[in-house]
Image (cartoon, grey):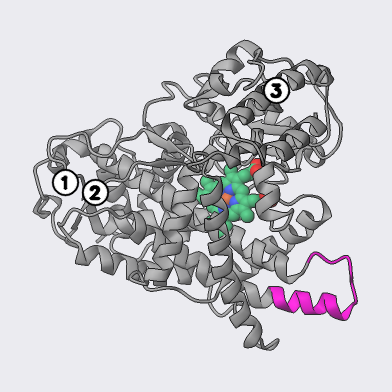
């Protein structure tokens, strides 16, 4: 099969569009006929000769795979063109594969685009010993940064950034605006602080330019799935499959990261390690001194790792916070309950991560937002690292594996009325926050998100500080507010939307707040009687009131 694809690839570089299409047809029929080697894979839906199951999976691949799971069960196979993908559709199957059989399932698929862009470097798409070394180092640095030696903790960096961010929101009070790139800059600045040791002004046009490139790529990357299945499609005119743009954008962001690394090398002082890049350079030099030729700590590797962290750390948390605002605007009663819990338990004190123990409803709201937003519905694709025996099948080495996280978050057996926004599902009988095991927005097992702690801290501090200080509404009077239907790219992100941020007056009665227009929210007395309202009696004894 690989030879057929290679020959097709070489030929099509020189041929026109019609001949390319013909060759794709012939080769795909050939591949389809030869696909008998897949006999050991779990069965799944029958696909078309050329496209496999691609047409059955659009527009929302995670939804379609969940539907297929009802017929084909916990584990089944689909084909993206000629490429087989094993889908893990239940929590038990994901856990069995990623936790109990973690080593065998901890690879990443070496697709055409990933090979071209990453060449096995970085962290997110690396595998083997190289990946293990880089992941261990990264996790170690994140822990150290958060809680020990560095000049200030992660939390204080987030607080500093929040001060700037809230100041900016105040300037925009009562004017409708789209918070997208302001939020993106603020969140990204925290990652930049950890890895680059610096932040960027919100008006820095170069920085904004890179954030927009990343945003564009996250939105459109899904299109490259066709180039992965049929690399020859990249020669078609018009860049329909986002191939040229992806390569160009990724290179630009990489060059930006490269320039920052060069500055670090020029001013490197081993007695003054102030950020992630410094710490990495120190490790590189130690490996050089040991003459370790097998080391994965090299300059190109550093560039790709930083690139992964910059991308991974910026877009994901920003997208989740944008979803949070969309849900709060669509559910003003919930927004008000969050405010009241914050107000009753920490008053006007600056929220700290420790406060989450006193704010179970706020935590539940954030969890419900992450459950429904499902920003990584299929996580990041895994691959088998060897021929793996699993549930009576033999999955060949290098087979792509999709964990269907979306299906866990929408499983009606776990979440009653799963489509409904109901934070109370994360509150137990004692009024405490708890999460069912099927709630896995950061994945599980050996590849679980290394930025989880950082992300949780950012989400909690941004969310509580925003709701403590502002009422968020939609300028779209009488309309429904932001759409809750997401756009599928690398992540599922909300459509752009405008907000109004109205400052709350500390210590004033709630009804003193002047909203830009009338909403049900002004009926605060009714809220107190609302049966959904969280009983906070349990934690009131520790509460500090205004
Ligand atoms: C709300 C925010 C975030 C969510 C929902 C999220 C979710 C995820 C998920 C589902 C995965 C894939 C797990 C798997 O392959 O099974 C992942 C991987 C990853 N995430 Fe996050 N993430 C978030 C924030 C962050 C942050 C802040 C960083 C870094 C600063 C980060 C860095 C990474 C990296 C490097 C990987 C690849 C890890 C590996 O392959 O070993 N993420 N994330």
Quick one: 524 or 491, which is closer to the camera?
A: 491
Q: Are marks 3 and 2 in contact (CB under 8 Å)?
A: no
Point out residue 330 in the picture as x, y percentages from the top left corner: 26, 37
**In the image, which residues are magenta?**
280-296
Instruction: Give the labeled residue for mark 1.
Output: 475
Sequence-earlier tag: 3 or 2: 3
Disc 2 CB within 8 Å of nearest ligand 1 atom? no
Circle 2 residues within 10 Å: few <14, some 14–19, many ≥20: some
Sequence-earlier tag: 2 or 1: 1
Quick one: 143 or 268, which is closer to the camera?
A: 268
Point out residue 42 in the picture as x, y percentages from the top left corner: 75, 18
Relative side of 428 to 111, left or right: left
Q: CA distance from mark 3 to mark 1?
A: 51 Å
Q: Secondary structure at mark 2?
A: loop
Point out residue 292 in the picture as x, y percentages from the top left corner: 89, 72
- Tell me the quarter of the image containing the C terminus: bottom left
Relative side of 546 to 265, left or right: left
As drawn, 115 above or below 33: below
Q: Which residue is located at x 24 percent, y 48 percent? A: 498
Instruction: Give the labeled residue for mark 2.
Output: 498
Instruction: Judge whether residue 281 is colored magenta.
Output: yes
Q: Which residue is located at x 68 percent, y 54 percent? A: 118
């Amino acid at each position: 099969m690989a030879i057929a694809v290679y020959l097709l690839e070489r030929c099509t570089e020189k041929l026109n569009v019609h001949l390319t299409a013909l060759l794709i047809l012939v080769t795909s029929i050939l591949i389809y006929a030869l696909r008998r080697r897949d006999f050991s894979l779990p069965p799944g839906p029958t696909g078309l000769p050329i496209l496999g199951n691609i047409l059955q999976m659009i527009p929302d691949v995670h939804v379609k795979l969940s539907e297929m799971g009802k017929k084909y069960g916990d584990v089944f196979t689909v084909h993206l063109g000629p490429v087989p993908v094993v889908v893990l559709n239940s929590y038990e199957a994901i856990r069995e594969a990623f936790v109990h059989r973690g080593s065998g399932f901890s690879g990443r698929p070496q697709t055409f685009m990933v090979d071209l862009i990453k060449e096995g470097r970085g962290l997110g798409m690396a595998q083997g010993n190289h990946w293990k070394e880089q992941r261990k180092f990264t996790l170690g640095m994140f822990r150290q940064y958060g809680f020990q030696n560095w000049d200030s903790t992660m939390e204080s960096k987030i607080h500093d950034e929040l001060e700037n961010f809230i100041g900016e929101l105040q300037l925009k009070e009562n004017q409708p605006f789209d918070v997208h790139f302001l939020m993106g800059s603020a969140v990204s600045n925290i990652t930049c602080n950890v890895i680059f040791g610096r932040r960027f002004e919100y008006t820095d046009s170069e920085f904004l330019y890179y954030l927009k490139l990343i945003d564009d790529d996250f939105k459109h990357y899904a299109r490259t799935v066709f180039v992965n299945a049929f690399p020859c499609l990249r020669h078609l005119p018009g860049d329909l499959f986002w191939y040229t743009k992806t390569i160009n954008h990724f290179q630009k962001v990489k060059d930006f990261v490269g320039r920052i690394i060069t500055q670090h090398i020029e001013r490197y002082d081993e007695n003054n390690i102030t950020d992630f890049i410094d710490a990495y350079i120190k490790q590189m030099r130690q490996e050089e001194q040991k003459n370790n030729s097998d080391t994965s700590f090299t300059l190109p590797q550093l560039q790709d790792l930083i690139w992964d962290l910059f991308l991974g750390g910026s877009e994901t948390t920003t997208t989740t916070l944008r979803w949070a605002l969309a849900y709060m605007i669509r559910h003003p009663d919930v927004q008000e309950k969050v405010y009241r819990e914050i107000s009753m338990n920490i008053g006007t004190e600056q929220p700290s991560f420790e406060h989450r123990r006193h704010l179970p409803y706020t935590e539940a709201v954030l969890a419900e937002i992450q459950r429904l937003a499902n920003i990584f519905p299929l996580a990041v694709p895994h691959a088998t690292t060897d021929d793996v025996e699993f549930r009576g099948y033999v999955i060949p080495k290098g087979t792509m594996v999709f964990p269907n996280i979306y299906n866990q978050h929408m499983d009606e057996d776990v979440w009653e009325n799963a489509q409904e926004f109901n934070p109370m599902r994360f509150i137990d009988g004692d009024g405490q926050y708890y999460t069912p095991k099927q709630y896995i927005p950061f994945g599980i097992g050996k590849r679980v998100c290394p930025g989880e702690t950082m992300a949780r801290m950012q989400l909690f501090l941004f969310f509580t500080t925003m709701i403590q200080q502002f009422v968020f509404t939609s300028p779209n009077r009488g309309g429904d507010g932001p759409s809750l239907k997401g756009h599928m790219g690398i992540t599922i992100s909300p459509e752009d939307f405008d907000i109004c941020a109205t400052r709350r007056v500390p210590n004033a009665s709630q009804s003193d707040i002047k909203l830009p227009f009338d909403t049900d929210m002004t009926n605060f007395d009714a809220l107190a009687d609302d049966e959904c309202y969280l009983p906070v009696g349990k934690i009131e004894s520790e509460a500090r009131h205004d």
